[in-house]
Amino acid sequence: MVQDSVILITGGAGFIGSHVVRKFVQSGNYQVINLDKLTYAGNLENLRDIENHANYKFIKGDICDFDFIRKLFNNYDFSGVIHLAAESHVDRSISNPMEFIQTNVVGTVSLLNAAKESWSGKNGRRFYHVSTDEVYGSLGDEGFFTETTSYDPKSPYSASKASSDHFVRAYGNTYGLPFVISNCSNNYGPNHFPEKLIPLMIHNIQNGKPLPVYGKGENIRDWLYVEDHARAIELIFEKGRNGDTYNIGGFNEWKNIDLVNLLCDIMDRKLGNTQGISRELITFVKDRAGHDLRYAIDATKLKGELGWEPSLQFKEGLEKTVDWYFENEQWLKDVTSGDYLRYYDEHYSNR
Ligand code: NAD
Ligand code: DAU
């Protein structure tokens, strides 16, 4: 890639996108255009520190608006697209699946189509689709998801992401669009919206509110610090093979209840509480419909081919995360006011 190559990052105001945008802007190797609709999950506060960099520009827009996307591709000669914009929360996909099909499927195809038109006859382009391990479905007690595991999505969210992965591969196969896909496990860290397990628990512990654990808390997730994901994305974008898929994961499985207990203990220590007091807030609530039991990524390929490994131990990452939320009280206040309260009440009142 040349110094002045222009790349489009979609969903850059969201949780993972903001870390990816910062990484690419700070590398100084690209002109970065961040396209984001600023839904409830998008927040320009996540990018305040880099918003005035000369190689960064924010554009507000909807990936589903094909005329607008087509014009954007006419205005800029993008050498690459890193596509993260999506509806990302499984619980919201259960209550409102249509929005997920619109953004995750129609929006992705709109970008693919604009790239196909604009890149016809040009070399050295790449469409990078940032996807999830949830496309592989759910594991039992044993085994791992590898890049060759069959797709078996089980929630409206994962079905929409699986569909978008299929469209990316179909555009590669049918039109020769150069692409790469990565499927990552659960991220955590700064800027995580407090509808997701870890920031929700941090917020509720701070406010002495019940900690809603779905079912018996026995579901297992594989957690990865978000900056490690952003580093993997940079590596794959620059060095991954066209037409290939890379799994990204933390080699770090935790049962939800064990994770929540650990978080309670970290928070009690940092808040100067009596140890054990936050654990008393744990409340077992009605399970998520169709709740996937276990995700676990085998990231051997990424390690072997591109030398990537997670850099942080989980406890260290959680400490950093909790510190970030303590230091960014206003961020948390802002995102948990207004619509968030309505969502929270509706979602948890009948559990
Ligand atoms: P997020 O919900 O925090 O952010 C999504 C961003 O996309 C927001 O800024 C939002 O405003 C924007 N957006 C939504 N609809 C849009 C539209 N129509 N047009 C333009 N922008 C739009 O999501 P996240 O957790 O940062 O996830 C980013 C991507 O990574 C998603 O594609 C998700 O599927 C994938 N992923 C997430 C995780 C995870 O643990 N969070 C793990 C693996 C993969
Ligand atoms: O695996 C990658 C996926 O991880 C991403 O593709 C998704 O975008 C991301 O949201 C995440 O999905 P999960 O459903 O695994 O994350 P969530 O934080 O919503 O839930 C994690 C686990 O915690 C899950 O087993 C459900 C449980 N949970 C969640 C919430 C919000 C609870 O027990 N209580 C809660 O209140």
Image (tube, rainbow, N blue to C red):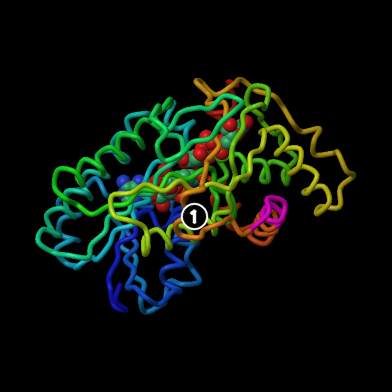
The count of marks equals 1
Q: Residue 93 is drawn in which quadrant?
A: top left
Chief secondary structure of the magenta span? Answer: helix
Q: Residue 86 is drawn in which quadrant?
A: top left
Residue 40 in sight from this viewpoint: no
Question: Residue at 72% of width from left, 51% of height from top?
Answer: 315
Give the image location of residue 176, x and y in percent.
16, 50
User: Foreground residue, 129 or 65?
Assistant: 129
Please, what is the three-letter code of the amino acid marked with disc 1? Gly
Q: Residue furthest front?
A: 304
Give the image location of residue 190, x and y in percent.
58, 56
Q: Is residue 237 above or below residue 171?
A: below
Q: Which residue is mark 1?
A: 304
- In the image, taking residue 132 as reference, residue 73 lies left or right, namely left
Give the image location of residue 81, x and y in percent.
29, 58
Q: Is residue 214 above or below residue 125?
A: above
Number of other residues with Cα within 10 Å of mark 1, as a class: few under 14, some 14 to 19, many 20 or more: few
Question: Residue at 41% of width from left, 40% of height from top?
Answer: 147
- In the image, taking residue 188 as reference, residue 161 lies left or right, namely left
Question: Residue at 86% of width from left, 47% of height from top?
Answer: 273
Q: Secondary structure at mark 1?
A: helix
Q: Residue furthest right?
A: 274
Give the image location of residue 153, x and y in percent.
40, 28
* Segment colored magenta: 312-319
Asked if residue 124 is among those painted magenta in the image, a careful observer would answer no
Q: Is residue 15 above or below residue 142?
A: below
Residue 229 in sight from this viewpoint: yes
User: Foreground residue, 210 or 341?
Assistant: 210
- Indicate the quadrant containing the N terminus: top left, top right, bottom left or bottom right: bottom left
Question: Residue at 77% of width from left, 33% of height from top?
Answer: 281
